[in-house]
Image (cartoon, grey):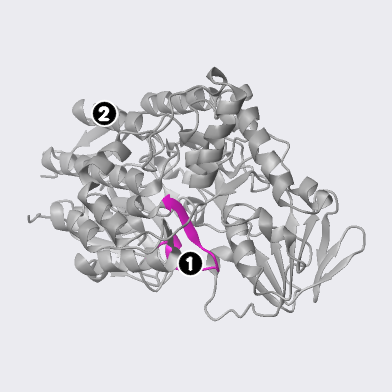
Amino acid sequence: MTHTNTHGGDVDAIVIGAGFGGLYQVKKLRDDLGLKVQAYDDAPGVGGTWHWNRYPGALSDTPSHVYRYAFDKELLQESTWETTYLTQPEILTYLNRFADKHDLRRSFQFETRVTAAHFDEATNLWTVTTNKGDTVKAKYIVCGLGLLSAINTPDIKGIGNFKGELIHTGQWPEGVDLQGKRIGVIGTGSTGQQVITATAPLAEHLTVFQRTPQYNVPVGNRPQSAEEIAEIKKNYDAIWDQVFNSGVAFGFEESTIPAMSVSEEERDRIFQDAWDEGGGFRFMFGTFCDIATDEAANKAAQKFITTKIKQIVKDPKTAELLTPTDLYAKRPLCGHNYFEVYNRDNVSLINVKQNPIDEITETGIRLADGTECELDILILATGFDAVEGNYMKIDFRGRGGVTLAERWKDGPDGYLGVSETGFPNLFMILGPNGPFTNLPPSIETQVEWISDAIKYTEDNGIAAFDPKPEAEEEWLETCRTIAGMTLFPKAESWIFGANVPGKKNAVRFYLGGLINYRAVLKEVADSGYASFEQTRISVAAE
């Protein structure tokens, strides 16, 4: 397909990001729609968040066979994997293979960061500026900036004074030697748990600085045989049909059974089966249908996990420090022998709510009670400024010069997770208020919807395309209402912004499931995008 540029831009579309979203978006716009596309990424190569997050133990918690693109059936059949969950190097290899197969690198300018994007209402074009000083005009921008990619560095007194190695897991450098070192890890979320279990066997001593104890179940990572993989490949059509027509899209059948509808003995048996099988989302959504919505069901899950902690951790004081007391209502975590790691003689746990970090010194960490923890390496597993973090690093200006930071000062808006009122022809992959799921199927869904929307605007002579304010507000209210029907807002979690001091607590996800989300997207498209303002190209311009 070929396309004639009639809008006067240097290119038709700019794509930001070279992860799952950006790569597929370039392919769709360039190869399927025939548009002229310029793409950028700050990294030296493809991979997105999986380029930077190369810390020890980095692992996807989505089953290997569904943490990939569904549409590329040839690549599905050619690809293989070692275990039930993919390691970071395997994911990076897969994305590089995808980029090679579709010759995507030629559309990217790597080691280049987009710093500003300003919309011109007179021309309906975006002017994009990079840190290299380049300016490029384009009709469309698609942001594949990543949901979890803007690192969150804690504001701790003296953090710049440490003379050892200070490393954030989200920007892990090559060549770090952990063997025989005194290591400190701040943070016990998903990343923290992975790096803790991987680091403990290497360290002379590992000190974990925990703010909030976390519920954790085994990940269940185990080798998969050639026969198992062949069977999966044979059944891929049915597997993907189930994924796209499910709630969380993790490749398992979600439960329809309320927890309180069975006996305590039967509940524990079902929990135990899920514990043995592994997987955080499987434990929360595959056991019973109401763990995330009913407090009694939630307490049953809490009790099962906290009982396991007390059984696994030998020291009662450490077990108590590791035992959560809040709701089991954050993004469900899973890991490999996480609680077992605290039985090691070379691992110690410090609760920084009870004994806060007073200062980072040249040689380590000083606690409020005066204790000095001497360290060679300090690892910050402090997560990300999730969802909108990377958008705040770019000077986006829409109609009337309004900045995206101004629009989102009370928490991010975002229509369908893909667009924003007042920012025409700007699309987002995994933008605010999109689905809370296994990410590649959501990414694929959004990239294809965005591509269809862009084709629609091109075919119908539309110069500017952005959601109507009332449609966006209705969508936000839908997201708030659904979130309010769950227990998630009652727990302090990054999915509502609680991990970043000063960040506005707000709904940032559509919790209605992928199947329902896809139905909403289809309804919007089938209506001729009636929920969007559509400014047509004037006759004079033509």
Residue 537 in sight: no
Label 2 and label 1: CA atoms lie apart by: 36 Å
Report crowding for label 1: few under 14, some 14 to 19, many 20 or more residues within 10 A (C-alpha). Answer: some
Give the residue type that dot 1 points to.
Answer: Trp
Give the residue type that dot 2 points to.
Answer: Val
Left or right placement of residue 210 versus residue 466 in this view = right
Q: Who is closer to the viewer here, 149 or 341?
A: 341
Which residue does the numbered mark 2 point to in the structure image?
524
Q: Position of residue 252 (x, y in %)?
A: 38, 39
* Residue located at (40% from left, 32% from top): 513
Q: Is residue 24 magenta?
A: no
Residue 364 in sight: yes
Give, as a single range, the part of the protein colored magenta. 47-62
Q: Is residue 52 magenta?
A: yes
Report crowding for label 2: few under 14, some 14 to 19, many 20 or more residues within 10 A (C-alpha). Answer: some
Where's the C terminus, which quadrant?
Answer: top left
Left or right placement of residue 484 versus residue 419 in this view = right
Query: Between disc 2 and disc 1, whose residue precedes?
Result: 1
* Residue located at (63% from left, 55% from top): 338
Which residue does the numbered mark 1 point to in the structure image?
52
